[in-house]
Amino acid sequence: MPKPSRRVITKPEALTFNDLYGKGITLSNNNRQATRSSGFGDAIVFSSRTIHTYEKIFLKHRQKQVDW
């Protein structure tokens, strides 16, 4: 009976924001922090790589917008 193959799990590269983002966004901290400059229009960001199924990621929300 053949041995089951072992999956090699490698550490994924750092997750940052893509250089493609909306006009209402400013990226800083080596593309690890996104700040919305004003309003909600054109304020979209994308990750720099695919997030894998079941991959755990951490997002920190630093400021609350009360009039949304």
Image: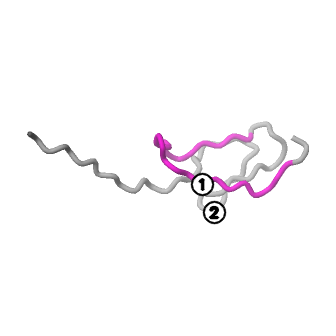
* Closer to the camera in the image, 65 or 34: 65
The kind of secondary structure element at disc 2 is loop
Looking at marks 2 and 1 on the same chain, the residue that comes earlier in the sequence is marked by 2
**Residue nearer the viewer, 32 or 64:** 64
Question: Looking at the magenta stretch, what is its main secondary structure?
Answer: loop
Residue pictured at 84% horizontal, 42% vertical: 39
Q: List x then y, in percent, for residue 14.
A: 49, 56
Checking the image for residue 39, the label placed there is none
Percent x, y of residue 7? 28, 48
The residue located at (65%, 43%) in the rendering is 45
Q: Which residue is mark 2?
A: 29
In this rendering, position of residue 36 left or right of residue 8? right
In-front residue for pair 47/64? 64
Give the residue at the far bottom of this rendering. Answer: 29
Extreme-left residue of the structure: 1
Tell me which segment is drawn in magenta.
43-65
User: What's under tag 1, amino acid-wise?
Assistant: Phe
Circle 1: element type? loop
Q: Amino acid at mark 2?
A: Asn
